[in-house]
Amino acid sequence: MNKKILITLSSMLAICVAAQNIVKKCKECGKPIASCQYKGKHPTKPVSSPHLGNNGQTVHPDYSQLKIGDYFYSDGTVSRVKKNSPQPVGVVFSLNPSDNEKKRGWTHGYIMALSDAKKGRCEWGPYKDVLEIPNVDVNYNDEAQQLVLIQDYSGYEYSRSSIVKSSNGNAYAYARNYPQKLPGSTSGWFLPSVGQWCDIIKNIGRGKIVIKGGAIGFDCNIVLPNLAKYDLGTDEDYSSYWTSNESTDIHAWMVVLHQQANDGKYENIYSINKQTTRMRVRAIAAF
């Protein structure tokens, strides 16, 4: 074939491809591929399955600009400023879901419910030892084990253990049955682990988790004003919350939002008798 003809055909093909790219739009931001800064391949993709919004139309949430503190709505959409419609159900407190969460398709992060799952306090869970939840009875001199505890993100797994799923009238059940509806593309509500509570403290409360003198805690003077926006820590007598972590067959871990420093150390995360103690419940979900 004549070389000039080959050059002409190549040029025409390049023009066609360029024209196609100009017309073709990015599925995530709606811009033409040529104008999209990611060329149609955003680093954070929306949920894989669209769902119906309040008006019955299919909703494709855009999580490409997702940030800590964004409000999460019943149709799966998010916004920087809180709106009244669709129904706001949570606030984004982490953009780093666990590896197990990612395997289940919840790759974007975690949200915290905007209100407690129950008015007042309740029991932790079954009185018996829940074998599917590892006992973490931390020795106050074992800092390595304390680090393991505050990095535990298995709240979803613990909340789905067979004994816990069949129990009612406790923290797990109230978290599971929190009435605000979530899209089917999420995990559904569950009781947060110590590590997930630590992320709430760090990312929403803007505090630092400190291990000192065998105690695990944070500066309430910094954290409480930031959590108050989400109705956390506003009632000093009732601002202690259950985690999904078990310490022994009769003890479970809790987070106390009101706790002053003692001898220069903060002790806000510790285990307590789960058979005789009542605490508040705040549910979370992965998405």
Image: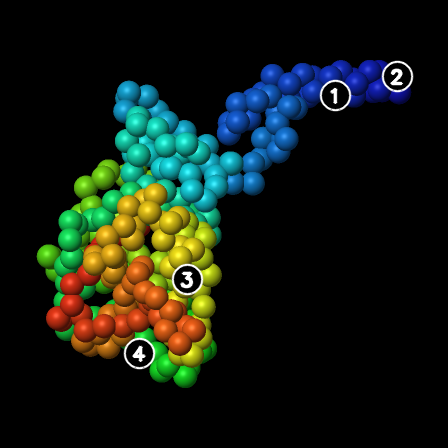
Q: In which quarter of the view is residue 59 placed?
A: top left
Circle 1 packing at 10 Å, graded few (<14), some (14-19), many (20+), is few
Q: Which mark is residue 14?
A: 1
User: Camera-side residue: 58 or 217?
Assistant: 217
Tell me the element at label 4. Answer: loop
Q: CA distance from mark 2 to mark 3?
A: 75 Å
- For marks 4 and 3, the one nearer the N-term is 4
Given residues 221 and 120, the one toward you in this image is 221
The amino acid type found where label 4 is placed reads Asp
Q: CA distance from mark 2 to mark 4?
A: 80 Å
- For the point 15% across and 49% down, which residue is it? 119
Quarter of the figure with residue 199: bottom left
Of the pair 275 and 240, the residue shown nearer to us: 240
Which of marks 4 and 2 precedes in the sequence?
A: 2
Q: Amino acid at mark 1?
A: Ala
Task: Mark 2: give few (<14), some (14-19) or many (20+) Cα within 10 Å.
Answer: few
- Evaluate whether residue 176 shows in this view: no
- The residue positioned 42% from the left and 82% from the top of the image is 142
Q: At label 3, which amino acid type do we have?
A: Asp
Residue that appears at 63% across and 31% down: 37
Please name the residue that numbered disc 4 is placed on. 137
Residue 155: give x, y in percent of width and height. Answer: 31, 59
Question: Is 147 above or below relative to 168?
Answer: below
Labels 1, 2: front one: 1
Mark number, residue 219? 3
What is the three-letter code of the residue carrying label 2? Lys
The residues bearing labels 3 and 1 have C-alpha atoms spaced at a distance of 61 Å
- Please name which of the two marks, 4 or 1, marks the residue nearer to the observer: 4
